[in-house]
């Protein structure tokens, strides 16, 4: 099979590797679409890497024995390789599993764990079925396109009476706008990227504020009668975005941190005690939420079509990454067989 590898700074190529085989409860999935996430950062930094991608949708082409899936099933490939046996996995919080499998140790081969490839191995319990009327493109959005912000909104219990601030309008933040619109919430977005700010408005954000504006906080307060948003989500993962999310919510409000980050600036007394905020760290969502997330897809299909701005065949992965580096895009999809 073919897969993508990074050879150096802005150097990538397709190589041929052995096609993995199904074994035990691990099924072999032919990847029909691989939504692209932050792998472009590795490409830009020159991080040598041969196992890229963690989002996919496809079809089961081989099983070792009868189980939860069968050949021909259309499935979403959930991220990570959790154990499936611990309390976290059994409760649906598999993303926090402390006993993740190493693919090479389980299978005896280094191949099968990458989504930027034509085939992938995955434990069958991490392969939710795709309803017949849902496309592979929309099903792939169950991962990072909609998943992290869906998890945040589930935890914060976002509803139609809430004003939600989305800070950062990369693909994850754009997915947050879609999730907020589905729930009937009033959505405000803060963005410093004109392309994505425009896209945020097209997806339904009521107001999109330039996050570089020195008066950005005052503008958010003006839009919320001086109170602040009921809830905020940092989808950018930098200190200024995190600070804006904390400062722009009302007293006793809620803040979810979704963007990947290595640092954080919070004042325990002012932010947590006196302001009474509740913080949530969100990596993904509970696996039991899959049926509800398919409801989002059913009702917001046209928004997803707008959120997915570009598609590329896998042999044009460098073009896709070069586009992502410019950030003049929404969600980008890769087709391993095109």
Image (cartoon, rainbow, N blue to C red):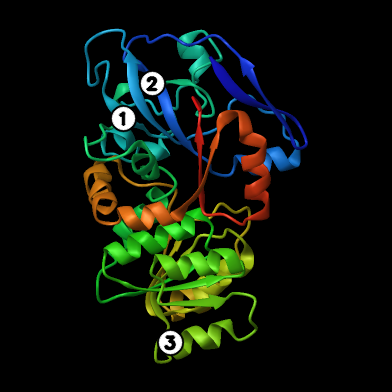
In-image side of 145 versus 7 (left or right): left
For the residues carrying marks 2 and 3, which lies nearer the camera in this image? 2
Q: Residue at x 58, y 64 (%)?
A: 195
Nearer-N-terminus badge (2/3):
2
Crowd around label 2: few <14 · some 14–19 · many ≥20 (10 Å): many
Q: Residue at x 39, y 52 (%)?
A: 305
Nearer-N-terminus badge (2/1):
2
Q: Is residue 105 above or below residue 185?
A: above
Mark 2 touches mark 1? (CB < 8 Å): yes
- Residue assigned mark 3: 223
Real-space CA distance between mark 3 and mark 1, rounded to the nearest whole angstrom: 42 Å
Q: Quadrant of residue 319?
A: top right
In-image side of 105 versus 176 (left or right): right
Q: From the top left corner, tell me how far across and down residue 136 is, in percent.
A: 35, 36
Q: Residue at x 49, y 64 (%)?
A: 199
- Residue assigned mark 1: 75
Q: Is residue 328 above or below residue 135?
A: below
Q: Nearer the viewer, residue 133 or 223?
A: 133
């Amino acid at each position: 099979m073919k897969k993508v590898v990074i050879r150096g700074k802005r150097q990538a190529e397709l190589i041929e590797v052995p096609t993995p085989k199904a074994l035990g409860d691990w099924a072999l999935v032919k990847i029909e679409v691989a939504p692209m996430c932050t792998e472009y950062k590795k490409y830009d930094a020159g991080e040598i890497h041969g196992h890229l991608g963690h989002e996919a949708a496809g079809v089961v082409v081989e099983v070792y024995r009868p189980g939860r899936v069968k050949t021909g099933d259309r499935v979403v490939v959930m991220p990570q390789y959790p154990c499936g046996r611990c309390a976290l996995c059994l409760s649906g919080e598999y993303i926090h599993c402390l006993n993740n499998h190493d693919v090479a140790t389980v299978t005896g081969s280094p191949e099968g764990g990458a989504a930027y490839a034509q085939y992938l191995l995955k434990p069958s319990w991490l392969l939710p079925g795709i309803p017949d009327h849902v496309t592979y493109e929309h099903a792939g959005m169950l991962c990072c396109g909609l998943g992290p912000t869906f998890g945040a909104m589930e935890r914060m219990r976002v509803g139609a009476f809430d004003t939600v601030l989305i800070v950062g309008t990369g693909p994850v933040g754009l997915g947050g706008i879609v999730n907020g619109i589905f729930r009937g919430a009033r959505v405000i977005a803060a963005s410093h990227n004109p392309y994505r700010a425009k896209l945020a408005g097209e997806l339904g954000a009521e107001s999109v504020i330039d996050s570089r504006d020195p008066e950005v906080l005052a503008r958010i307060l003006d839009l919320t009668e001086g109170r602040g948003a009921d809830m905020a989500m940092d989808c950018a993962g930098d200190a200024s975005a995190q600070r804006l999310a904390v400062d722009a919510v009302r007293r006793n409000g809620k803040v979810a941190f979704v963007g990947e980050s290595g640092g954080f600036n919070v004042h325990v007394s002012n932010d947590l005690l006196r302001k009474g905020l509740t913080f949530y760290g969100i990596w993904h969502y509970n696996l039991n939420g899959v049926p509800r997330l398919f409801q989002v897809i059913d009702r917001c299909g046209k928004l997803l079509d707008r959120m997915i701005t570009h598609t590329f065949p896998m042999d044009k992965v460098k073009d896709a990454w070069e586009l992502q580096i410019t950030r003049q895009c929404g969600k980008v999809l890769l087709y391993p067989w095109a």
